[in-house]
């Protein structure tokens, strides 16, 4: 295969679908704290048990394939992938080998690059393994089958990603689509990736890193691995084609096992599952259930609300944010709404390590807050502070402003008086400013803010201060 | 295709069966005889034939996404004495 | 026989608990001699009998009240040891009933024991019993086999002097072979007719649960109860079983390849005698041919069944249930191999390896895939004949019951070739049955009849005709 970029990355992503039950049995999908409490003879692989396919998992997978523009196979057929491992309750995994549900899909990144998807298919999750004395020091393992049989969708990309950051962005876009389709709940569903990474200097010798959880870890692991490969080559050593694991604690990749022989999975068709016809009627029904996705929404925001492209993309990324924005934009200037939600709401969410789903307020509070800003009743600083407070409790910004007396000081005469006072009191700063130090100007403005407890209209204060300082010479 | 001890070893490894030398000889002999007779299949041309993975087909059987009773942890673990704090104890996965 | 018995139970003429106690004692002594049972569930059977007696008093008893049932040991019976005849599952008592068993219980049948079989169904003579298990003996001559793999089912059906139906299972001929060798009726319905939920799988696309009885009349009442769609088995048929048929004159096809070389002359003679009687009664009996089935059937069957079986048996590796060792300190490859090698018998190992090989990369197309394509051709071949004929007949087995010592001398391939007459309907999943056609010096000979998919009614009709001839 011919490559041109310096770094070549391919992803194999496993997404847990948001269903009530497992893929092939009626056990609850959500795991509980206690091990082996969400299990039954089917997911424990007891003799005589047989799988029965979860309708919702099929529907979710179909919607995903449609949203990612895949070619669909005409029949849904499952295979048994045989390999012995303690996390496999049957020592084979029911997956799709011969004909994946979707193939030749596409996902578009923010800047427009289209990443091609090789295949999308449905399979079951193995059990969870715990190493009682760490990965390297345990003489035995502990197995919890709560997860065994959970419904997964596997998405395989062509090796077309060219940097760790791009890989992370791909995942972000994917999660946006998954949440839009309502087939994935970030609170209860896991998303894991295996990655293939190779570099030009290493003649594109591929290394696989397995089982990375979380996007930050993905970027870290990829970055580490690229560095590791470059270092090896610089030393005159070769990059071995192997499988490595990401050690989150040590922030390194460790060799799992060099593939002595290619694993032979001895695929047969799963004889216990019935063939499902993927008919045109079924596809039509699924298609109707797909909402406007982020891409289209973002384009619509640009058109309808005249937002700039970047603001529109950010607003459209998460369904909850997009809905919030549109509700706010009904009453507030959309551009202000977008700017505020993008800068201030996201800032405050990040700081508190919360997601938009965890906020206690809704559009009512934002609308109140922004109308106070629009009418210049409060300063931006005050608004920011109110935003921060809203993260811990729900309250009416209008009433709060009244109660705390936070109305902006916007009378020019008042401001002028305060400026004059500050100029009088801060002799040194004034001297420094007149000598050319711009920093001191900000200090002086800051002093006015201090006196007014942040309520002074910043733009007006700026203007008046400059005027007064001119005459102060 | 050579049917010899090497093949038997490869297959037994995949099947997780530990065979001693006499077993390897025995199964090697059996394979030779059986696959020799089964070679008659080469005579039939089925290139354009579709596979029958089941003799009679019932299609589109699906299950509603409804929770069904699970078994208790006790019931799950009752068949083994190798358990610890509610987990199954298993062999090492990392050398 | 069955209907009269149930009447007597429901009327109180038969005191059920006493009756069951007697039956259990009889089975105990039969077993000492003939080894038909892996487990006789005395406690459970008596408990059941008591419960049913109460239901009889309140007139709430089911359709099969008091019917004695034995169950092949590869069907799960809740809390009763279910080993599939293998040592690796010794001590395993399932948490649930197979659906067929559940349905029988609901109608108040009494399950008295689990019958002997070749481990996992791997055998045609019931000589491939698991390690530490006994080989069941033919009641006509204890040096001879019962046939397999449902040998215990056939044996107990033959010797029981109480009303009884055996629940058995066939993958490649496991109902027909023993029923034929023991001189009883073995009935195997269409694939999917009876739910396989709770059947410890040999080969998922070939396994079928069926029954063995002494009288044709006793088949339908049991089949009706155990058959029908089960949401736990995605391959179970939705269409309800049709047990009635009144075709004016069934058209019969005689499979010519089944009466040629390799068939014992006495067997051939017995079948020809029946054909003569049928012709005298005005039935059209014409020679037909199944060339693909007879040329490629056995390899096709073994490649598909072992491919599936080798994956089915993978879960038996000393984790979660079944025989185990101490896993601590061992690698998983080491541990799994240890347990499996210790407890699987010779034939289990052989078939696991054959099946693993057949689906290996590089061999898969020539073996597993090719076999599934030939299967299509075999089904086509049968379907074509059923356009013209209602029933196809042949001997069930090429021989009468061989000596146990003779079987032990056979090579694996020679063993497999004995399925030549039964693999056809098993591969096609068509209903088929065996019924007594005479004997050779006391050793039973069986006639096998096959009908098209879902034509159990026609098959029963035909069996009644044959039964009436004797």
Image: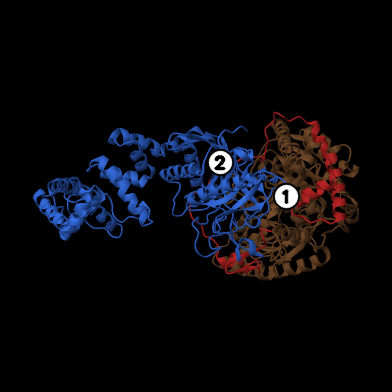
Chain colours: A blue, B red, C brown
Residue shown at 34%/51% (left/top)? A347
Sort mark 1 into few (<14), some (14-19) or many (20+) by Cα contacts within 10 Å.
many
A342 is higher (above) or lower (below) than C130 = above
Q: Quadrant of the N terminus of chain C?
A: bottom right
Residue A427 picture quarter: bottom left
Q: What is the distance, in whole Å, between disc 2 and disc 1 at their CAs?
A: 37 Å
Residue under the point 67% across and 32% down: B50
Q: In screen coordinates, is C441 left or right of C303? A: right
The 10 Å Cα crowd at callout 2, few under 14, some 14 to 19, many 20 or more, is many
Front residue of A57/A369: it is: A369
Which one is in front, C209 or A285?
A: A285
Residue C369 visible? The answer is yes
Q: Quadrant of residue A266?
A: top right
Chain to which the residue tagged by mark 1 belongs: C
Q: Is residue A442 left or right of residue B6?
A: left
Residue C239 image point, x, y percent: 58, 43
**Residue A293 visible:** no
Q: Which mark is residue A55?
A: none
Q: Which residue is mark 2?
A: A9
> What residue is shown with label 1?
C310
Closer to the camera in the image, A70 or C329: C329
- Above or below — where is C265 with respect to C109? above
In this view, C100 is above or below A6: below
Q: Residue at x 72, y 49 (%)?
A: C309
Query: Are dots 2 and 1 on a single chain?
Result: no
- Tell me residue C275's x, y (percent): 81, 38
- Image position of C16 (left or right of A103): right
Residue A394: image x %, image y %? 26, 58
Provide the chain ID for the residue under circle 2: A
- Of circles 2 and 1, the one toward us is 2
* Residue located farthest toward the left when viewing the structure as drawn: A413
């Amino acid at each position: 295969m011919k490559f041109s970029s310096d770094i070549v990355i391919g992803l194999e992503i496993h997404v847990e679908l948001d269903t009530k039950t497992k893929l092939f049995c009626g056990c609850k999908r959500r795991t509980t704290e206690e091990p082996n409490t969400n299990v039954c003879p089917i997911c424990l692989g007891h003799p005589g048990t047989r799988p029965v396919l979860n309708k919702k998992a099929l529907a979710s997978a179909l919607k995903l394939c449609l949203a990612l523009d895949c070619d669909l196979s005409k029949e849904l057929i499952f295979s048994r992938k045989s390999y012995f491992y303690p996390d496999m309750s049957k020592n084979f995994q029911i997956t799709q080998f011969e004909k994946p549900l979707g193939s030749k899909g596409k996902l578009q990144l923010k800047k427009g690059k289209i990443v091609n998807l090789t295949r999308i298919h449905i399979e079951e999750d193995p059990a969870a393994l715990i190493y009682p004395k760490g990965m390297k020091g345990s003489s035995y393992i502990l197995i919890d089958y709560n997860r065994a049989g959970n419904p997964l969708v596997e998405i395989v990309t062509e090796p077309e990603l060219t940097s760790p950051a791009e890989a992370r962005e791909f995942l972000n876009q994917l999660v946006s689509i998954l949440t839009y389709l309502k087939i994935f709940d970030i609170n209860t569903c896991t998303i894991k990736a295996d990655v293939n990474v190779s570099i030009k200097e290493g003649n594109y010798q591929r290394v696989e890193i397995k089982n990375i959880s979380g996007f930050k870890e993905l970027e870290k692991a990829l970055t580490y691995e690229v560095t590791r490969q470059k270092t090896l080559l610089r030393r005159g050593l070769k990059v071995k084609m192997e499988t490595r694991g990401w050690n989150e604690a040590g922030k390194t990749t460790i060799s799992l096992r060099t593939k002595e022989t290619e694993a032979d999975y001895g695929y047969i068709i799963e004889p216990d599952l019935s063939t499902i016809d993927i008919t045109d009627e079924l596809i039509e029904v699924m298609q109707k259930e797909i909402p406007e996705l982020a891409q289209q929404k973002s384009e619509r925001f640009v058109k309808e609300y005249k937002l700039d492209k970047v603001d529109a993309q950010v607003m459209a990324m998460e369904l909850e944010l997009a809905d919030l924005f549109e509700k706010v934009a009904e009453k507030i200037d959309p551009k202000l709404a977008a700017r505020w939600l993008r800068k201030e709401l996201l800032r405050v969410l990040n700081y508190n390590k919360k997601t938009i789903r965890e906020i206690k307020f809704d559009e009512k509070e934002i609308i109140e807050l922004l109308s106070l800003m629009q009418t210049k009743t409060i300063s931006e600083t005050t608004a920011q502070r109110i935003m921060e407070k809203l993260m811990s409790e729900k309250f009416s910004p209008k009433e709060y402003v009244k109660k705390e007396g936070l109305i902006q000081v916007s009378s020019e005469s008042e401001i002028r008086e305060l400026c004059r006072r500050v100029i009088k009191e801060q002799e040194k700063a004034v001297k420094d400013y007149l000598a050319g130090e711009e920093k001191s100007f900000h200090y002086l403005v800051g002093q006015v803010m201090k006196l007014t407890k942040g309520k002074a209209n910043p733009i007006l204060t700026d203007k008046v201060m400059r005027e007064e300082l001119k005459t102060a010479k | 295709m050579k049917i010899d001890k090497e093949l038997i070893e490869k297959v037994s490894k995949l099947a997780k069966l530990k065979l001693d030398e006499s077993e390897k000889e025995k199964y090697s002999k059996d394979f030779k005889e059986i696959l020799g007779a089964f070679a008659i299949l080469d005579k039939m041309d089925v290139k354009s034939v579709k596979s029958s993975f089941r003799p009679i087909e019932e299609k589109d059987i699906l299950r509603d996404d409804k929770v069904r009773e699970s078994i208790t942890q006790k019931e799950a673990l009752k068949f083994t004495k190798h358990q610890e704090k509610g987990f199954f104890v298993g062999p090492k996965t990392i050398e | 026989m069955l209907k009269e018995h149930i009447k007597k139970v429901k009327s109180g003429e038969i005191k059920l608990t006493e009756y069951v106690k007697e039956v259990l004692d009889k089975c105990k002594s039969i077993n000492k001699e003939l080894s038909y049972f892996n487990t006789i569930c005395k406690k459970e059977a008596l408990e059941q009998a008591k419960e049913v007696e109460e239901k009889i008093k309140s007139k709430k008893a089911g359709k099969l009240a008091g019917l004695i049932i034995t169950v092949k040991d590869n069907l799960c019976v809740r809390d009763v040891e279910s080993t599939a005849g293998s040592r690796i599952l010794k001590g395993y008592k399932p948490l649930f009933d197979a659906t067929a068993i559940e349905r029988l219980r609901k109608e108040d049948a009494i399950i008295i024991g689990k019958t002997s079989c070749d481990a996992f169904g791997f055998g045609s003579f019931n000589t491939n019993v698991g390690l530490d298990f006994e080989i069941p003996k033919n009641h006509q001559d204890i040096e001879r086999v019962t046939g397999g793999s449902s040998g215990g089912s056939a044996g107990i059906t033959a010797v029981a002097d109480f009303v009884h139906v055996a629940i058995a299972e066939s993958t490649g001929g496991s109902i027909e072979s023993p029923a034929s060798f023991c001189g009883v009726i073995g009935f195997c319905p269409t694939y999917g007719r009876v739910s396989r939920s709770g059947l410890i799988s040999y080969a998922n696309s070939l396994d079928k649960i069926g029954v063995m009885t002494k009288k044709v009349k006793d088949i339908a009442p049991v089949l009706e109860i155990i058959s029908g769609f089960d949401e736990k088995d995605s391959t179970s048929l939705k269409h309800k079983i049709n047990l009635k048929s009144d075709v004016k004159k069934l058209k019969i096809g005689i499979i010519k390849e089944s009466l040629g070389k390799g068939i014992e002359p006495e067997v051939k003679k017995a079948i020809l005698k029946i054909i003569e009687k049928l012709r005298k009664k005005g039935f059209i009996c014409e020679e037909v041919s199944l060339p693909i089935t007879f040329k490629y059937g056995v390899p096709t069957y073994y490649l598909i069944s072992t491919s599936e079986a080798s994956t089915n048996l993978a879960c038996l590796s000393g984790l979660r249930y079944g025989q185990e060792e101490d896993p601590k300190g061992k690698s998983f490859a080491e541990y799994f191999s240890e347990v499996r090698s210790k407890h699987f018998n010779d034939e289990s190992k052989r078939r696991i390896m054959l099946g693993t090989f057949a689906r290996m990369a590089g061999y898969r197309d020539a073996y597993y895939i090719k076999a599934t394509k030939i299967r299509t051709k075999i089904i086509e071949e049968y379907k074509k004949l059923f356009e013209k004929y209602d029933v196809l007949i042949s001997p069930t087995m090429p021989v009468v019951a061989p000596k146990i010592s003779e079987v032990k001398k056979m090579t694996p391939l020679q063993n497999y070739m004995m399925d030549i007459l039964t693999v056809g309907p098993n591969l096609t999943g068509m209903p088929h049955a065996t019924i007594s056609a005479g004997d050779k010096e006391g050793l039973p000979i069986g006639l096998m009849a096959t009908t098209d998919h879902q034509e159990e009614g026609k098959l029963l009709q035909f069996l009644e005709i044959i039964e009436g001839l004797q």
